Image (spheres, rainbow, N blue to C red):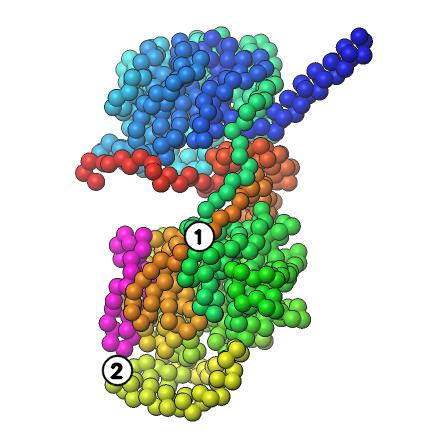
Amino acid sequence: MRTLLTTALLITLFLSTAIASENNLQWLRHSAISPDGQFVAFTYHGDIWKVPVDGGKAVRMTVHAAYDAAPVWSNDGKQIAFSYNRYGNFDVFIMNATGGELKRLTYHSGDDWPSGFTQNDRSVLFSAVRTDVLKSMLHPDFGELYSVDIDGGRPEMIFSIPVKNARQNKNGDILFEEIKGYEDQWRKHHTSSVTRDIWLWKASDSTFHKLSTFEGENRNPVFTSENGYYYLSEADGNFDVYRSNLSDNENMVQITDFSPHPVRYLSVADNGTLAFSYNGAIYVKKPNEEAKELVIDLSGDQNILPREPLMVNSDISEMVVSPNGKEIVFIYRGEVFASTIEGTLTRQLTQTPEQERTLDISPDGKKIVYAGERDNSWNLYTMELGKDDQFFVNAIDLKEKILLQTDKETFQPKFSPDGKEVAFLEERIILKKINAESGTVTQIHDGQQNFSYADGDQHFEWSPDGKWFSITFYPTAHWVSEMGIIKSDGSGEIINLTKSGFYDESPQWSPDGQMIYWMSDRHGAHSVAKTGSFELDVYGLFLTQKALDEFKMDKAEAALMEKKEDEEKDDDKEKDEDKEDEVVLIDPIEMEFEGLRDRKERLTLFSSYISDVKLDKKSENLYILGRTDKKYTLWKIDLRTKETKSLASFDKSGSLQFDNDYSHLFVLSDGKISSIDVKSEESESVSVNGEMVLDYSAERQYLMDHVARQVKKKFLDPELHGADWDSLVLNYRRFVADLNNDFDFRDVLGELLGELNASHTGARWREKASKGDQTASLGA
């Protein structure tokens, strides 16, 4: 019997410890204590749960694949209102506190977030961004305060000012936090003009009174049963619970002392018991007692699906067209795929939790190169067809190899025209190249005239003869780019070809190497401060006087010259047939540096917001993907006659690429690929029909590591504003494995990034809602 009792005791202790241990790994948020102080509602795994105030077995109140959050109790404790995104946006719903049927109260396409009930429990208060009053001078994106009847109906505006976490007492007074301006909601430790304050609106005379006095963050106020209120403040350097008096706001008393993480989601019961969340756990503080972490049993059926099959038919982020003209290689959700151009055969080539990106394909079409962020570093990889393979979509003997692996970040690889070398960026701004066979690395420039704001924002391109690079660089300390060239053997300095003082970017070579063309905002609309978006034009710089003279020929003169060139080519046709499988390079490019900057021509007839641009094989036609209104248009400009045609229309920006013989122009826009027949000028969609299995948990853990490394690599202050970054990353990373949705993952990342105390720094994510509500606005 003693043995059995001992065993039972050990099992009980083990289970209790296991529950507590699991609780330390769970991300519990949006805590709200019931008015009678008996239960705490909270959010976990995207559902609303309820647990006794002393902990124990939790009951799931909602069960749905959508995300439920922000529960608030009615004053009589009989109902719970919450926000629910079942219809593509967050609406206010209501249910009985014992569970049961849900009732939808709001129907707007924006997000509605409840904060409390009116004192008579007839309406729910909620914050939303809808329609501001006409006379308001505030930014319209900060929102207003509304109420909606518990039986539904048209919401009524309470305040036109930006209000969060509003609560009403029995006198009808409203306590709230004021939103002064834009800042990430999880930013910590800052004092600025946009830190939030606590205000009171008195119903008796409709006047507003500022209550908080601390110049930093003050949030989440809740009335006490007496003439006071609790709220969260960073007055001690960290978000903690404070108490103050409505009539004496200088008398603030600190109630909790947590460190190093913030207290969130404060609520109070009628008996004075407080509930809040701290570092993923729920805490309760009863009057005259210390705060206690609740041990919550969340065992049972969990709404979590770590692996899910995905259809691969859109959301393509980048692509390259194979020289064989039969297949494309592309990136979908950080994986490399290949697909036939004619047909629906699609194949996944890589399968890693980490991200692959910046694809290129060798001139002979037998090898691809890409960057992969594996083992906590960006490295370069190649994948090569086997001896008897012709296509990546059905290759039997594919081989992935490490091209370059160092302790430096390396990505954005591009094959040289002969396929023997690969250019790449080291640490985002240093241009280098590697010999694909020997592994010898050569530095092209040291990156001292480059600055990277976001990965992939550096532009460079091999010249057709492989002897030069065209690049975008920043020769001054100002954020104004210039266009230049530099020798590909690493022996020279950057030659500035523009020196304009305007934005000059994305230089490319004409196929014959006689012209460099690029985009500039010289003539387009732009702000005086050189900020925000701006219109662009395309310019051409001719490397010899002969090239410029030929460009200026009229159509008849050009036809005579072309006839003569065709006759000369016929004489060499037999020689070229013997080299059908070889990569043919053009002759070394001739450059006349004297007067080079003067041989410049504007190629476009009007400015527009240009996404990408390409010249055809003979440099006779310029293809531009740009917009002058809401939609992007693919224009074709005849550079001799200046005739301009509209070939296709797209909803979003994109990229352009010709196939090897320039017979088809491929457009990647809004995640989908289209093909334009250059001769007929007809457009058709390129079908992609594949699938993959996504491990969400592994992907989120990779993204956590990716963000942590990005911060250490790119944050301006090497001391990270004093944040103990490594320990903070370890703390927040332990929650990731248990998450089952990206709303919670966004908040985990947001809390981590908020520790940097940097403006506009946080995590952004919004769910795609293809069938979400669409609310009309009168007069819009």
What is the chief secondary structure element of the magenta stretch?
strand
Does residue 218 appear in the picture of this structure? no
- Where is residue 253? Give x, y as percent: 52, 17
First along the sequence among labels 1 and 2: 2
Start and end of the magenta stretch? 622-651
Name the residue beneath numbered marker 2. 555
Tell me the element at label 1: loop
Q: Is residue 557 above or below residue 638?
A: below
Q: For the C terminus, which image quadrant?
A: top left
Q: Residues within 10 Å of mark 2 (few under 14, many from 20)?
A: few
- Where is residue 664? Give x, y as percent: 37, 68
Residue drawn 55% across and 11% down? Answer: 286
| Amino acid type at mark 2 | Lys
Q: Is residue 258 magenta?
A: no
User: Which of the numbered marks, if any, corresponds to residue 177?
Assistant: none
Tell me the element at label 2: helix
Instruction: Give the CA separation, mark 1 to mark 2.
Output: 44 Å
| Amino acid type at mark 1 | Asn
- Where is residue 412? Give x, y as percent: 53, 61
Residue drawn 57% across and 66% down? Answer: 389
Residue drawn 31% across and 62% down? Answer: 683
Along the line of sight, the residue nearer the viewer: 767 or 271 = 767
